[in-house]
Amino acid sequence: MRTRHVAPAGALTLALVASGTISPAFGSPADAGEAGAHPGDPDFGPNVTFVDPSWTTDEINALLTSVNDEAEFSQNRHQVFFEPGVYGSAAGQNDPATATDIVNATVGYYEAVAGLGAQPGDVLLNGALQVNPVVRCPNSPWACQDPGSLTRFWRSVSNLAINPIQRAVEDDAALPFPAGTADPHQLRWAVSQAAPMRRVDIRGNLTVFGRFGEYASGGFLANSRVTGTLVTGSQQQWYTRNSAVGTWNGGVWNMVFSGVEGAPATDFGPRPTGGTGNKTTLDTTPLSRETPFLYRGADGTLAVFVPNARRDSRGVDWSTSPDAGQSIPIGDFYVARADRDTAQTINAQLARGKHLILTPGVYRLDKPISVKRDDAVVLGLGYASLTPTNGNAALEIADVTGVKVAGITVDANVPESDVLVRVGPHNAHKSDPADPTTLSDVFVRVGGPWAGKAVTSIEVNSDDVLLDHLWAWRADHGQGVGWDVNTGAHGLVVNGDDVVATGLFVEHFQANQVLWNGERGTTVFYQSELPYDVPSQAAWSDGDRAGFASYRVADGVQTHTAYGLGVYSFFNQGVDIREASAIQTPVAPGIAFRSMTSVFLNGSGGIEHVINDTGAPAVGSFASPQVVAYPAP
């Protein structure tokens, strides 16, 4: 793991000005950082940078290069905003090797890049914001597919348009087979979990795996348009929601589409012509809400647009009209900074009726951030991270409706927390089906940056809640990792009724990864790896049942629906560990599962059935059995 100190954006860019690398024009780095880009903007602190069209592409690329080299578990965080305008030249679009005046850089750990337009097309980048796999064998990358993109986590791009012109950059450009080389009109975003692409207009092709087919375990694309081909290639799984694609190609085990114009037809299961399919397509998304985003109004002031929830929706929705959502002035937000704010100061501002923006940083909290007001907005920038320090939760939402939480990372700590994110108290009774409380791009870690313990990562007690792109991860690598070190029973527990999850990733917890007790729950796309480090079968048994089902619907539940589920095993302790089934559910007229697979990745032992007692084993060697529908029609 490389470790390099990166100065905060404000100080760093001033140093670039002093060195002559970039010029100190208005809107350039000399004006970025601690102050906003315009007079009247709030103080976003040193880790937020505003770029405007007066910057040259050399200046932009220098900035992006300065913030894209964080280590995997760095505590530095970065947000880069592009003001409305056109950046770079399209002159080299037909031959990227000849392109010069382009915005072209990789996007690294804890880096979020976003446009500030009301529409994605208000910010047009000629070039590439690219992510490429780890290159382990530079002379023969096709022979070394592992780790590839399996650890390309925690980065994002949103609310802009890209005319793809991608060239290899930095050290990669000097390799005999650069990972960053791309075909004309192609952008590579080869990522795994917690790396969303939202509200993006790709004016060409998008590939989400490595140039040489390296492993990848993504991924999430929402409210975006790809005018050319979306190629998922070696991605183990991928979820595309409410988007439009020209054509689609690729993927391995579990490709799920909902509300996507141009999506392929469902073919999951045995094909009439032989082989098996991997695609599940829903014509509409049962419940959706796009994430709140910051934008620059026509009068030059900042505001946050909060889209309305939609039911049975399809295609992109980039409208910012009053019918599409609410625009909240920036003055209605408290802009928090990790270098000065505590739970007490943040909660005081929330109690005064402010919404909350969490600027990039790590917030150490001796009590939870407490959201007690209907329709409050909590918006994280640049992977803002919350960590409890007193065995407390990091975030609690009271018995209220319509709260929107987006763009935060939560890290467990010691002493152990019972819950890290709690939506509603145990006796919650308030809800609004038309305005569901929504969690978007919420990522929870138990271990990784340091030792942490949490019984449950996310607990949902309120009814009518939408969970849109969550990753709860008990770390399998990093710091503070071990069966008795980073302990965690559940990634998600749902006690509320009418809860919908779209894009649910939950991995490595020590009991049921997901425990669903509420009625009328719906999941569209689920990805889960079982814990790697199980020391013995006795340490991992649910009563007299071998192992814990990853996705568990409680016995008394009468109605539950789920589409596109994949559960994988890699027991790496050299012990024959078994899981009776990847999914466990009661059988009732209102229970319906569609498109399920279990996969033996490596190691020993494995999964004996896909769901209940149905589905072939994936034990002892590679296998990926499928169950098309349960109960069988």
Image: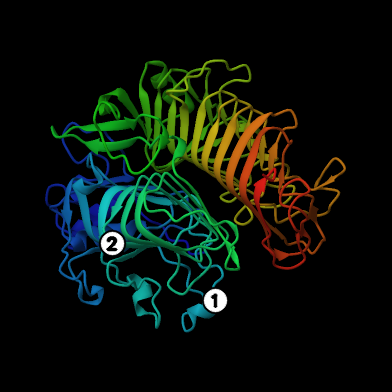
Q: Which mark is residue 408?
A: none
Mark 1 lies on a secondary structure that is: loop
Q: Is residue 222 above or below residue 21?
A: above
Mark 2 lies on a secondary structure that is: loop
Q: Dot 2: few (<14), some (14–19), or many (≥20) neighbours within 10 Å?
A: many
Q: Which residue matches tag 2? A: 204
* Residue 415 is at least partly visible in this image: no
Q: Which mark is residue 144?
A: 1
Could you say which is closer to the camera, residue 411 or residue 588?
588
Could you say which is closer to the camera, residue 26 or residue 109?
109
Return the disc, 1 or 2, that comes first in the chain's sequence.
1
Could you say which is closer to the camera, residue 1 or residue 628?
628
Q: Where's residue 33, x and y in %?
A: 26, 44
User: Going by the image, does 631 lie left or right of 574?
Assistant: left
* Residue 90 is at least partly visible in this image: yes
| Separation of marks 1 and 2 at Cα, in angstroms | 29 Å
Q: Residue at x 52, y 19 (%)?
A: 398
Amino acid type for the residue under numbered disc 2: Gly
Q: Quadrant of the C terminus?
A: top right
Q: Dot 1: few (<14), some (14–19), or many (≥20) neighbours within 10 Å?
A: some
User: Going by the image, does 10 lie left or right of 291?
Assistant: left
Q: Is residue 211 above or below residue 338?
A: below
Q: Is residue 471 above or below residue 278?
A: above
Q: How is the image coloured?
A: rainbow
On the image, which quarter does residue 551 sit in?
A: top right
Amino acid type for the residue under numbered disc 1: Cys
On the image, which quarter does residue 55 sit in?
A: bottom left
User: Going by the image, does 172 lie left or right of 367?
Assistant: left
On the image, which quarter does residue 186 sit in?
A: bottom left
Q: Where's residue 290, x and y in %?
A: 38, 37
Q: Are marks 1 and 2 in contact (CB under 8 Å)?
A: no
Of discs 1 and 2, which sits in the foreground? Answer: 2
